[in-house]
Amino acid sequence: MEVTQATTTTTTQVVFQEPELQLDRSTILTQQEVVQITLSGPSLVLAILSIIVSIQVFQPSMTCTLIALAPIPIIIHNDYLNFLSLGPGGTPPTFLGYLKITYLRLFALSDPYRPATALKKIYPQTGYYQRASSWLPQRQGPRPKIAGIAPQRQLNQPGCSEMYLTLRTSLTNLTKRHPSTFLIGTSCFEKKGLAVFARNPINATCRGEICHVHHSDRSMHMNLHPDDARIVLEKGWGERHPLARGGWMSAYVPREFIMVYAPRDRGELEVVCRIIEAAGFWVSGQRFDIKVEKEPLPDVAEVQEACSA
């Protein structure tokens, strides 16, 4: 997800270009400990000799300072590798991009599971499910481990590849059933990946984006009414994005921006679709149903051609 200013327009034009999907058997992303130094035999001997020489050449205080500072480059290097291991996601995978994200960490939410405080001026005033908590079941098991800001990714509890493809088909079919309300495209936040947009958004997101799906870990980001987001957080289905704190941070992501974990089976996919329905309501103001479907609907042009044949 790229840290760019979130804006809204009354008419959204999105171009979608994505290469053919190639699913890997395992989508578990890995991270290493930033404070992790492994020395081989020769390296260990060299380190000991360096300390002895430093004691002889410099003052003890200077030697202690050098020893204390020595791990810093290694820590930065390991942290930079962790940033790269999350894969592409908007922020350039360069050291400059890493420095930008490191700076934004200073302002990240300390507790992503705590719901945002209620706003006095908000429209719609209540969420899609009218502040009811019974619409969403409790997610089974512990929460997955999440890492990163931009990109932000799920490290364990990988989603099912079949459910991921079914979700993509279901979202695409939604836009085909309601072409005047929604359209499919490339994520405005991530600059890659499949996303659903509202043609006439009523709340500010990045070009009216409702949600996008991550190919690497099969999780997703979406914008939700605070009432619905609170239930999603409480029932363990997602967490707030680290930068979704409002104020000047809204230049990067909306205050209502949350991550929803990857569905592991058909039951969880059904729940995720209900959450996306709530996200669509918040951004577009429209109520709709998402049908869980494996088979894509024909395009309008294909239907017209078949009818005229």
Image (cartoon, grey):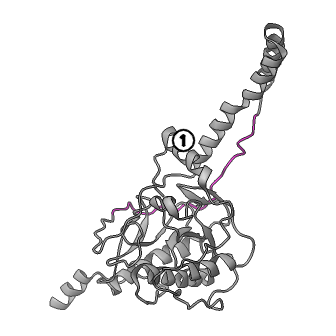
In-image side of 230 versus 307 (left or right) = right
In the rendered image, residue 80, in percent from the top left (x then y), is placed at 59, 41
Place residue 309 in its image quadrant. Answer: bottom left
Q: Furthest residue to the left?
A: 308
Q: Is residue 34 above or below residue 55?
A: below
Magenta region = 17-37
Residue at image point 74% right, 40% down: 35
Q: Main secondary structure of the magenta part?
A: loop
Label 1 amino acid?
A: Leu
Q: Secondary structure at mark 1?
A: helix
Label 1, on which residue?
Answer: 99
Residue at image point 67% right, 66% down: 157
Residue 309 visible: no
In the rendered image, residue 251, in percent from the top left (x then y), is placed at 45, 59
In the rendered image, residue 42, in percent from the top left (x then y), is placed at 78, 20
In the rendered image, residue 103, in percent from the top left (x then y), is placed at 56, 46
Residue 47 visible: yes
Residue at image point 22% right, 81% down: 301
Place residue 270 in its image quadrant. Answer: bottom right
In-image side of 136 versus 168 (left or right) = right
In magenta stretch: residue 100? no
Q: Is residue 22 above or below residue 131?
A: above
Neighbours of disc 1 within 10 Å: few (<14), some (14-19), many (20+):
few
In-image side of 43 versus 103 (left or right) = right
Q: Nearer the viewer, residue 218 or 49?
A: 49
Q: Furthest residue to the top?
A: 57
In-image side of 111 versus 196 (left or right) = right
Q: Is residue 285 above or below residue 104?
A: below
